[in-house]
Image (cartoon, grey):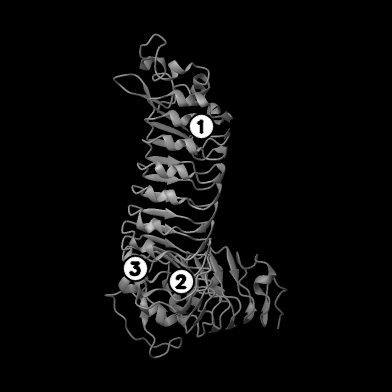
Amino acid sequence: MQLSRKPLLALLLVLAALPSRAMAGHDGRGGVARGDDCCGAWEGVSCDAATGRVVALQLEAPPPLLPPRRHYMEGGTLSGSLGGLEFLETLVIRDMARIGGAIPASLSRLSRLKQLYLEGNLLAGGIPSSLSKITSLQYLSLAGNRLEGKLPPELGSLSSLVQINLAGNRLSGEVPPSYKNLSRLEYLDLSNNLLSGAIPAFFGLQLRSLALLDLSNNSFSGEIPASLCCLRNLTDFSVSHNKLTGVIPSQIGSIASLNSLSIDSNLLVGSIPESLFGLRKLWNLNLSRNGLSGSLPPGIRHGLPAIVSMDLSHNHLVGGIDQFFRSISTPGRPTKLISSKNASSDMSVIFLPRELQHLDLSKNRITGALPEFGAGASLIWLDVSGNAIGGQIPGSVSKLSGLQRLDISRNKIRGTIPASMAGMASLRWLDMSGNAIVGRIPDSFAGMARLRHASFRGNKLCGKIPQARPFNLLPAAAYAGNLCLCGKPLPPCRQI
């Protein structure tokens, strides 16, 4: 788009004052309004090259890095006169934070419209049921507004719809049964609303083309329908932050196309289905904040080769942490026995998958001891806090050189802090509070320049706190509950 052209918001104000014949592309004498009437002068207007009729209107806020354009930020409402643009195929009014009011029912007269994007505005009221008259509509997005009321059952008649995005509104009630007729639907996002009721089984039976299904941050209840496992094209599935009960369907592993699976923050129980760990394209797995029980999953390395982020936190999972790490150790890399003062004779070096960046096992019932780590991992976040992990901190944890967050707090870890951890140059968050760690905080930690948060409270540490940022600037609570730590921010060490 040429920035020198007149802003489209001004055009909308002009259109509101024009008679319907002019809006339809006529010149008032039965002729056709040519492109020089508006297409060449108005930014965001596209016309058919042959007829000169307006076929697309696109009003979008400028990218964040560009200076704001005053006219684009003017307030107002959408004019009902827009419904007179009978040859319009695309209507986009996006991220205009001061445009409010209701969605004009007159848009139903746009019989050729294929794309309707009214995203990121302040539109209020209900979704007009009259939109169901736009039988040519393929893409519908009303996301990020203040729409309320129920989902119009009439939308189920729009059999050409490929995408529906109603996320980020205040819609309530259940998903209408008529939506089972949307057999071409590939993208359905109803997240961040007030929707309730059961997840319809017909999603998996009639909407077989779905590639994205996002129902997160609502109040859906009942069980996850096993029929969803019939969606062979599904790549992204999220039902997080609802009130779902029951178990994860055992057939979940049959959705071989899944890239991202988020079922966190529900009321699910039972064990993690073994079939889930055969999803070879899965890179994001979040099952956190449920009531899942049973053992930590074994054999992950054979079934989840693409995994980047795994969050199993806030459940009731049991098992040994060392066995779990062994199960995700990269195949084809040597697993050799080592002997050191921090490792038992049967401890083996663990080479984490290079793709894995985020691992959260916190607040479960995991036991065992942390293993010895090999170099080459890409792990950024490791949280095993709130378990019953014992043993010592392996010095080889420093080989996780890209680690930015390490939380081993509230466990039963003993022994001393390895001085080699000072070499973890990327570390920004370190929490080893609530354990039984002895000795002192290594003086070499003074060189951890990127560290922004650390907590050592509730251990058995003694000695002088490293007098360098951030250690001497942390609150005293970060060192409370130890034996005899001293130095800023605590009282000075005694001179002997």
Mark earlier in primary sequence (2, 3) = 2
Between disc 3 and disc 1, whose residue precedes? 1
Q: Which residue is mark 1?
A: 105
**Where does residue 305 sit, x and y in percent of width and height?**
32, 68
Callout 3: SS: helix
Alpha carbon separation for disc pair 2 and 3: 14 Å
> Between tags 3 and 1, which lies in front?
1
Q: Of the residues shown, which amino acid type is indicated by label 3?
A: Gly
Callout 1 secondary element: helix
Q: Position of residue 121 (x, y in %)?
A: 54, 38
**Mark 2 belongs to which amino acid?**
Val
Q: Is residue 283 visible?
A: no
Q: What residue lies at 32% left-to-right and 62% top-to-bottom?
A: 281
How far across and how far down the image is residue 145, in percent? 55, 42
Residue 283's disc number: none
Q: What SS does tag 2 mark?
A: loop
Q: What type is the residue that disc 1 sits on?
A: Ala
Q: CA distance from mark 3 to mark 1?
A: 44 Å
Judge by depth and name the residue closer to the eye, 146 or 30.
Answer: 30
**Closer to viewer: mark 2 or mark 3:** 2
Q: Which of the image's four quarters has the N terminus?
A: top left
Q: What residue is disc 2 on?
A: 247
Location of residue 113 in the rendering, given as x and y in whole percent from the top left corner: 39, 32
Which residue, as the protein is rendered here, is positioned at the far top? 29
- In this rendering, the label closer to the viewer, 2 or 1: 1
| Residue 103 shown left or right of residue 252 in the figure | right
Look at mark 3 in the image and give the residue it sits on.
253
Cβ atoms at labels 3 and 1 below 8 Å apart: no
The first of marks 2 and 1 along the sequence is: 1
Q: Residue furthest bottom?
A: 345
Quick one: quadrant of the C terminus? Answer: bottom right
Q: Are marks 2 and 3 in contact (CB under 8 Å)?
A: no
